[in-house]
Amino acid sequence: MPRRKVNAPETVGEVLTELAVLYRDARRGRIETLDASRLATILNILRQTLESYALEERICSLEKLVER
């Protein structure tokens, strides 16, 4: 079966949605729990990265305001 293209989540909300889908698929037996665990780890790393990036952006904005 050909693999379908899946876009990476771009927001923390999208990551959480993907985690919920992954959880349901694992619970329903549509995906092996080991595979679900591995994918959840990747999604959590992505979530952390998105959160860190957002915080960095906010800090930079605040630093620019303070420098004025």
Image (cartoon, helix red, strand yellow):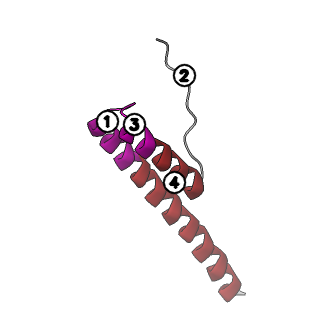
* Mark closer to the observer (4, 3): 3
Front residue (pair 67, 3): 3
Q: Which of the two discs, 1 and 3, labels the residue nearer the N terminus?
A: 3
Q: Which of the two discs, 1 and 4, labels the residue nearer the N terminus?
A: 4
Alpha carbons under labels 2 and 4: distance apart: 21 Å
Residue ID for mark 1:
35
Residue ID for mark 2:
4
Q: Which of the two discs, 3 and 2, labels the residue nearer the N terminus?
A: 2
Q: Quadrant of the C terminus?
A: bottom right
Alpha carbons under labels 4 and 3: distance apart: 18 Å
Q: Is residue 34 left or right of residue 9?
A: left
Q: Is residue 34 magenta?
A: yes
Secondary structure beneath dot 4 equals: helix
**Percent position of residue 57, x then y:** 60, 68
Q: Which of the two discs, 4 and 3, labels the residue nearer the N terminus?
A: 4
Residue ID for mark 4:
16
Helix, strand or loop: magenta stretch = helix
Q: Is residue 14 left or right of residue 66?
A: left
Which residue in the rendered view is the most extreme toward the front?
28
Residue ID for mark 3:
28
Secondary structure beneath dot 1 equals: helix
Report the magenta residues as a range.
22-42
* Type of amino acid at the residue the image marks with label 4: Leu
> Residue 58 falls in which quadrant of the image?
bottom right
How many labels sit on residues?
4
